[in-house]
Amino acid sequence: MITMATDLKQGVFYRPLYDYQGYGGTRYFPLYFSLHALLLKLGMPVIGSAYLLSAAAVLLLIFGTYYLLTGLGVEPWLAACAAAVLLASTSVQMSLSTPQADGLAAALNVCGLAAIVRTPHSRRRVLLASLLFTLAWSAKLTTAFGLATAFIWLMAIGCRRVAWLLAAATGCGYLIVAGVMIAASCGRVIDIFRACASGGADWRFVVTAPARMESMAVYTDPALVMFAVLGLSLVLFLAFSLKLRQNLPALFLIATMAITLLIFGSPGTTGNHLLDVQVASVILLATVLAKLASRSKELSVYGLALLTLIAVVPLLRQLTGWSRWYHPHQFGKVIELIGPTGAPILSENPVIPVLAGQYPYVLDPWMIQLLRKRIPGFEEPLLERLRSRSFSAVVLSTGDPTQKGGQFWYETVCFAPGFVSALTENYRLASVIDRDWIYVPQTSSSDESKGE
């Protein structure tokens, strides 16, 4: 995401799948990295501006959740506490501490619901909601469940004209965003998304999506599992009570869960996509607690305390494991070790060449693995550059490529078959800094003899 922002700062909006400068390919929509590019244009540092944007997105998500809950009749104190509970989620913390669009898309989506849930449904309010839903979609392609929720809910409560106006206005917004993307990329985005958008999904991945989503949630965010189970239990209760279609939070959870399951039907999907399920679950549970508060405030306080405990216990258990991920990276030391060079740096993490002042040769190593299955010989320019020792350094961030696990990663998940042999035959390990394995070109025997 940072690389796409620095590309845009230099005037490149969606680099092509491949050209003389290297490899592109992405499934990201433009709002987040365009905002980041704007911050870079204003002179902000690369890493600092990324953190600022991520923090602002999460703050907007908390505010939007609070505003939506108060619009649903939840007392301000309970709405504020419920919104703060979101911070205990692993997926929310990931959005807070890494440059990604999930938090921004979720925030705009929730703000759109908060705008439409309030009456009267004036044209100005409908257009505001439409704008927010459009911006959410422009941040993340799959963020359409807010619009779906609002449309079904408006139809169910008898506001059919408002529902169709919202759908039409948002549809026009989607078309405008798509048109701008196509025009600004000179049509490249069409080829890029045609090749990359599905991520290599097929019917087998789609069928097993629920199991993969469950295992990912259990592994990365146990609190989410408990929130989701409670939320879905409430959805079943509302279904039997025939009040489901008029309950916006329940519809929101259903729509979010359905689209998230579709997302997990694509290879390469990770735990960051669970954020929206967490948000929808908390919103539904908070509205139930609000009804309890109308009968007994103490009972609702106990319920909120229980939800907070559910969220915090897994958080405490994983602090040790998370310390491996959330720590200061030593990018400066890596760049210093490589030294000034005119040759490109090949890096699994493209932020390293960005910080070194280069145009990264590879935008996303996983996309090379995906696209080589569709475009014969797609990986050959990369392998040939390795064999010719054209890179000043190769920086790998997942592990030792000479070990079985590392070799599997770099041959079947990232880059391509033949990558490890091309690397080890032409580069030597210079150092390991933090989690980065730094390789530099080997010196040939003829070069050594000349030196002697």
Image (cartoon, grey):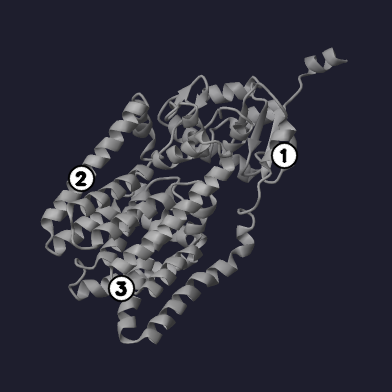
Mark number displayed over residue 169: 2
Q: Which residue is mark 3?
A: 234
* In the rendered image, the vertical position of residue 213 relative to residue 383, given as above or below: below
- Label 3 environment density (alpha carbons within 10 Å; few <14, some 14–19, many ≥20): some
Counting residues from the start of the chain, the first of labels 2 and 1 encountered is 2
Relative side of 87 to 428, left or right: left
The residue located at (64%, 63%) in the rendering is 320
Residue at x 64% of width, y 53% of height: 327
Image quadrant in which you'd find residue 399: top right
* Numbered mark located on residue 235 in the image: none
Q: Quarter holding the C terminus?
A: top right
Q: Which residue is mark 1?
A: 333
Identify whether 68 is placed above or below 19.
Answer: below
Q: Amino acid at mark 2?
A: Ala
Contact between marks 3 and 1 (CB within 8 A): the answer is no
242 in relation to 37, above or below = below
Left or right: where does residue 408 sit relative to residue 137?
right
Q: CA distance from mark 2 to mark 3?
A: 32 Å
Question: Which image quarter: residue 117?
Answer: bottom left
- In the image: residue 67, left or right of residue 344: left
* Residue 4 rendering spot, x and y as whole percentages: 48, 35
Residue 82 picture location, percent across and down: 41, 70
Residue 436 visible here: yes
